[in-house]
Image (spheres, coloured by chain):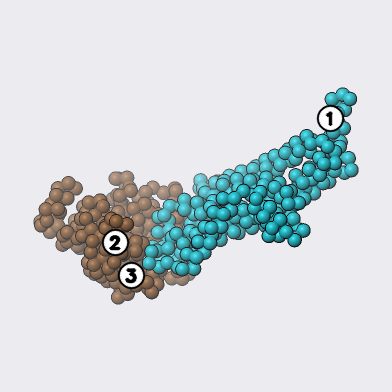
Chain colours: A cyan, B brown
Amino acid sequence: MSAWQQFYVRFYQAFIENDRWRQYIDGVGTTLLVTALALLLGVILGVIVASVRTAHDQQSPNRRNPVLAILNGIFKIYVTVIRGTPMMVQLMIMGFVIFASSRDYVMVGALTLGINSGAYTSEIIRGGLMSVDAGQMEAGRSLGMNYLDTMRFIIVPQAIKAILPSLGNEFIVLLKDTSLISVIGGKELLYAARGVVSRTYEAMYPYVGTAIIYLLLVMLFTWLLGIFERRLRASDRR
Amino acid sequence: MIVVNNLTKSFGELQVLKGVSEHIRKGECVVLIGPSGSGKSTFLRCLNLLETPTSGEIIFDGVSMTDPKTDINRMRQKMGMVFQHFNLFPNMTILRNITLAPERTKLMTRKEAEERAMELLARVGLQDKASAYPAQLSGGQKQRIAIVRAMCMNPDVLLFDEPTSALDPEMVGEVLDVMKDLAMAGMTMVVVTHEMGFAREVANRVLFLDEGVIVEEGDPHNIFFNPQSERLKSFLSKVL
């Protein structure tokens, strides 16, 4: 067989025979769904954890709120545990221990990824809130505005601009990390590729194809994030 | 109007204020002078509780600021503050900078706040900047806006924390002129400054702080031309 024939046969086996391209497409769909769900959960968790931890740190010394102290303690443990253990191990514990009886692997995967992402996102948001000059909070409070209003109108709008690049980065990491849920049976893109490999005994085309699809997705989102950021920055140069 | 009783403030091991007692009366312009690290700014920031005093008491309009049960936000509405670094909100227009607080604290409706803001802006000659953003203004303009922002709450007292220290020399005058006008109009003011000329001309009373205590106080003439303590004499010989 000539090299061209070999390429054609392998490509045909990997993507076209038995409509295998559908498996990849379905896989990409699941990948995007898991990314979206995990991102949503991650941002919600991140905002809650970051708000509580920042509010706790910014209390005046003689007006400490005990509820905040307890929540702050819990969230600190959460961040420590999630950041201190591998994503893969978290997935296996969630998939094979905590939700061992569940067959909805995609949802278990999205949940695990969301909880994982929340820990990192919370630190990104906390960093963004802390990066706003302390004088801004002082100015807001000295005018008699309460803490929440000062946060909402003054601190948060400034923090968002600062955290967008890191948040975009976290989003891209999350998109690629969804490939891990194939180990607990989540039928995403890499799972589809592995299925094809096990049937055709040919690894290169499915895996390189998968890599190219991820790369294209990441490039697409990087481009979109770039447009979004530039728009925000344009409003800076007024 | 503001009574301070035996105020102390420590940052960890470092005691910045070592028992300061003072009475600031209505309509007075009190200027605090002293070397850096003497506790002037800390004293000022304790008055509206931006710094929490370690011990002592601050009574403003008959209400104890240091009592944990006091609604501190309500008290701060009557106590404006102007900062060394202006601290305008870069994410909003000048007009919004000024109207945000009166509107959110329900002191005025948005329309009332905007009318009041425009009136005050006209007074400092910056009405044409209402829709500009802070980044487009010079330091002197920013500080005048910051004063207008504090004034828009109709406060009973204005606290100034080194309002001209971050300005180019040529812009100091325009800010001091606004402050002078306020003092002439009978505004109660507490000013931390290195502008000895302002202290001499405008202050009703000058306090000299050093190492966390009020070393000497009196009317400007006595402080500047007839200092009693050695510490004040040596300070004045360096700054005048």
The image shows residue A174 at horizontal and vertical percentages of 65, 48
Specify whether disc 1 shares its chain with disc 2: no
User: Is the residue marked by circle 2 packed among few (<14), some (14-19), or many (20+) residues within 10 Å?
Assistant: many
Q: In this view, does A157 lie above or below A209?
A: below
Residue at image location 47% in from the left, 64% down from the top: A69
Badge 1 crowding class, 10 Å Cα cut-off, few under 14, some 14 to 19, many 20 or more, is few
Identify which residue is drawn at 31% across, 64% down.
Answer: B53
Nearer-the-camera pick, B196 or B138:
B196
Say if A19 sits above or below A73 in the image.
above
Q: Residues within 10 Å of mark 3 (few under 14, many from 20)?
A: many
Q: Which label belongs to residue B66? A: 3
Amino acid carrying label 3: it is Thr
Chain of the residue displaying label 2: B
Of residues A51 and B215, the one nearer the viewer is: A51
Disc 3 is placed on an element classified as loop
Instruction: Determine the chain carrying the residue at label 1.
Output: A
The residue tagged 1 is: A7
Which residue is tagged 2? Answer: B9
Q: How far apart are marks 3 and 1 (CA)?
A: 80 Å
Is label 3 on the same chain as label 2? yes
Distance, label 3 to label 2, CA atoms, is 13 Å
Residue B130, quarter of the rendered image? bottom left
Can residue A171 be seen in the rendering of this structure? no
